Image (cartoon, rainbow, N blue to C red):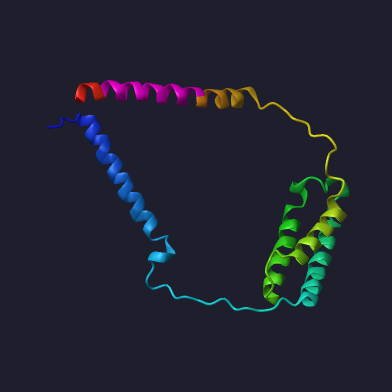
Amino acid sequence: MIVMDKNAFFVFKLFVVAIWANSMMTSGLSATEDKHQQIHKPNVTICNEIALMLEMSICEDDFKRDMDLVDPKNWCNLTYYIKEYNAFSTCTEQNAEGIGCFWPNPLVESFIISIHKHFFSNCTSDQVIWEDPPDNMLTILILIPVLLTVAIIALVVWCGKRNDVML
């Protein structure tokens, strides 16, 4: 007859309930288990590259007009033009998908790279400046692995002692 500690039995029941709850929550997320899901075949269309580049030039014109309102010395600080860049990115994505092209694709990527070269070519620094994190963050980053190691060692020793009692 195996005698089990009340706390160990409670932890075991809690573990079983957690596994059961996790499986119940994730079962609805699996597409393979959904019997009512219809299988859709993707529409295969050929990307019209000329139309794609025309649409990209519209996005480019809008972005250039928006960036003209931003001071060029602030072009390297994303907080000054985040809305404009988001509108540009959304424009390229929606227009590419509207014509039936994948996004991103090599043409759109090269287009976006040319925009980056035009507006953000001077934003890279030649030398990376590494900084230490603040002292309180550094203390946390050091203490977490140390305390976890001590806790795991204590757990192994405690379980080792518990096994001796159960035998």
Which residue is at a point 72% across and 61% down the rendered structure image? 89
Residue at 66 percent of width and 79 percent of height: 45
Q: Residue at x 70, y 76 (%)?
A: 99
Q: Position of residue 134 (x, y in %)?
A: 65, 25
Residue 123, percent across and down? Answer: 83, 45
Quick one: 21 or 105, which is closer to the camera? 105
Span shown in magenta: 146-162
Image-based side of 132 in relation to 57, left or right: left
- Give residue 154's quadrant in the image: top left
**Residue sitting nearer the eye, 148 or 61:** 148
Q: Quadrant of the C terminus?
A: top left
Which residue reaches farthest left? 1
Q: Which quarter of the figure has residue 100?
A: bottom right
* x, y percent for residue 42: 57, 76
Q: Please name the predominant secondary structure of the magenta segment in the image.
A: helix
Answer left or right for 62 relative to 7: right
Q: Residue furthest front?
A: 167
Q: Is residue 152 magenta?
A: yes
Q: Residue at x 61, y 24 (%)?
A: 138
Percent position of residue 41, x then y:
53, 77
Left or right of 7? Residue 102 is: right
